[in-house]
Image (cartoon, helix red, strand yellow):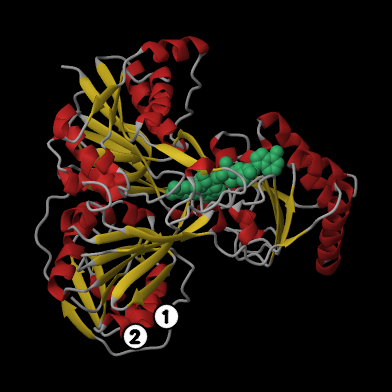
Amino acid sequence: MATKILVAVKQVIALDEDFEIRADGKDVDADFFLRDLNEWDDFSLEEAVKIKEAGGEVEVVVVTVGPEEADESLRKCLAKGADRAVRIWDESMEGSDSQAIARVLAAAIKHEKPDLVFAGVQSSDHSFASTGIAVAGLLGWPHAAVVNQFDFSLGATQATIRRELEGGVLQMMNIDLPAVLSIQLGINTPRYASLRTIKQAAAKPIETLGLGDLSLNAAEVGEVGSASRVRRMYIPEKGRAQMIEGSLAEQAAKLAAIIKEFKGATV
Amino acid sequence: MSGILVIAEHRRGELRPVSLELIAAAESLKASSGGPVTVAIVGPSPDTFVAALKVTGVDEILTLAAGSGDFDPDTQAAAVSAAIAARSPSLVLIPHSVDAFGYAAVLAAQGGYGFATDVFKIESDSGAWVATRGGYGQKVNVELDFPGKAVVLLTVRAAVYKPAEGSSNPTVTALPVPNVSAHVRPGEYVEMSQADDVDMTAAEFIMSIGRGIGEEARVPQFRELADAMGATLGCSRPIADSGWLPKSRQVGQSGKTASACKLYIAMGISGAIQHLAGMKHVSTIVAVNADPGASIFSVAKYGIVGDIMEFGEELKTHF
Ligand SMILES: Cc1cc2nc3c(=O)[nH]c(=O)nc-3n(C[C@H](O)[C@H](O)[C@H](O)COP(=O)(O)OP(=O)(O)OC[C@H]3O[C@@H](n4cnc5c(N)ncnc54)[C@H](O)[C@@H]3O)c2cc1C
């Protein structure tokens, strides 16, 4: 039987320059959103695709929770080697925090029955660093966070992983499978999609699932199904940075003077 | 539900300093919580940490004897669950650490608790907990509340609260931990390899480059600039992960701390919290970034908005 690896991915939001907070004060105005695949997910997808390319029967399925615009990120994953892409959405999922998203992903995992689940350590926009591990909690699966090496052979019931800790220290661990792993930057070198695979991906279907397909109800997702609620979003005070203005030459001269003064003071 | 439970953390036999920071946070919120501050410590011989945890503000220390001495997420989650069940706190504080990444979300999911991570400010608004964290790559602050949640679990950013000091005379209680079958078996520790002889922790003047340099071919130009200025060349994580500079030059949470640094120039670095962890203490930080909204400017003393390629060339003419 084929080994199925499910990779949970997210389309993240970066903010355009001079962004503004929405009138209700609870989010940034969506006009300033720039969307892309989460940086960490590039690495978790690559890790799954590497396993597939090492031989044997492996299927890589990417799953995201998000509205239609997330298809663009799923296509990117298809172009980088995913076999199938699934997008789960229902209007009631709007406003979901990482715990509510995890509930949807856990339901998707029951539906897909994968042998391994990868998620990114965190997303570059809200950096909760918790979705993948919350999924494991809901499923009761073994789990490990911040994994930067994964040694595994198809069909094995255990794998060796390496966890990245603080301060340049790593730790080897042995984990039971199936498991959910949160994958860290640098575990591999993610590939670029080629023109050919991008074209192929454009022609592939994206499967869509809703609440009913996963036997979820609206009260389990969205703001009501979340573990937190946004009260207010605001732009923080810019701190103490004194901006060095002027022409390029003037700015460089000012910084050079700061550096020379510093060096004069320390020698 | 009242009182605050703090989960202390240790690694390789040492109490992690962030534990004392969280105790200080709990002590500052004690009046609002209407209950005691309890500190829980999990390990095969938790008693060894008790003396170090008897700091100002602590009312009770729970020792939970379990595990092998090295973190495993299943034992830790079971023990913390037992502590929550035994003391019914309204607020649970856990360090926002790599260990916590491995179990805090499990507790929240299984317990149905209010939950937020990487929190740097905690308040009480008419009896309800309010937590503040960053959003959109730290460009905004997000204030969260937890309607309908009797227990709120927060992972708290390190180096925000000053560590608790002084002494206290708390009750020490040993709490049993239910047997769990751990699915993860911790093994040996490995130090990141040192491909380079540079010691970032000793450098007084560092210029670091980030993803803003765009391509590897530009690294030599910045190396020359650093040499000309007498600066040690450092970098943010993507530069080291791509192999453009050795890992030993990476500044930040999973890299080096610029401990001796007095002047730090960040070129094309956005200011992610994990990078700041290695350099935000430096007295003079200069940030050069094309994005005027980059969060690095919130820790910098001097900021320059512009292109680092052009700026680097211009700066070079002075040395
Ligand atoms: C557990 C964990 C540990 C981590 N440990 C570390 C760590 O130790 N160290 C670390 O650095 N990161 C670490 N990270 C990663 C961190 O979250 C960020 O991803 C990383 O710091 C981003 O690096 P950067 O600022 O160079 O890149 P980006 O965030 O991509 O920022 C690039 C910046 O360059 C600017 N820019 C682009 N082009 C130009 C130009 N031509 N001129 C001027 N400016 C330009 C952009 O405006 C942007 O601000 C860790 C993450 C996790 C989850």
In 3D space, how far apart are the residues under numbered discs 1 and 2 (Cα atoms)? Answer: 8 Å
Q: Is residue B275 left or right of residue A218?
A: right
Q: Which residue is mark 2?
A: B57
The answer to which quarter of the image holds residue B61 is: bottom left
Q: Is residue B280 left or right of residue A135?
A: right
Residue A112 seen in the figure: yes
Q: Residue A13 location in percent, x, y?
A: 47, 41
Q: Earlier in the sequence, mark 1 or mark 2?
A: 2
Image vertical order of residue A1 relative to residue B156, above or below:
above
Measuring 54% from the left and 59% from the top, which residue is drawn there? A235
Question: Of the numbered discs in the image, which one, if any, rests on residue B242?
Answer: none
* Residue sitting at the far left: B179
What's the chain of the residue with tag 1? Answer: B
Question: Of the numbered discs in the image, which one, if any, rests on residue B164?
Answer: 1
State yes or no: discs 1 and 2 in contact (Cβ < 8 Å): yes
Q: Secondary structure at mark 1?
A: loop
Q: Residues within 10 Å of mark 1 (few under 14, many from 20)?
A: many
Measuring 48% from the left and 18% from the top, which residue is drawn there? A193
Image vertical order of residue A236 relative to residue B4, above or below:
above
Do the residues marked 1 and 2 share a common chain? yes
Q: Residues within 10 Å of mark 2 (few under 14, many from 20)?
A: many
For disc 1, does the CB lie below 8 Å from ligand 1? no
Q: Secondary structure at mark 2?
A: loop
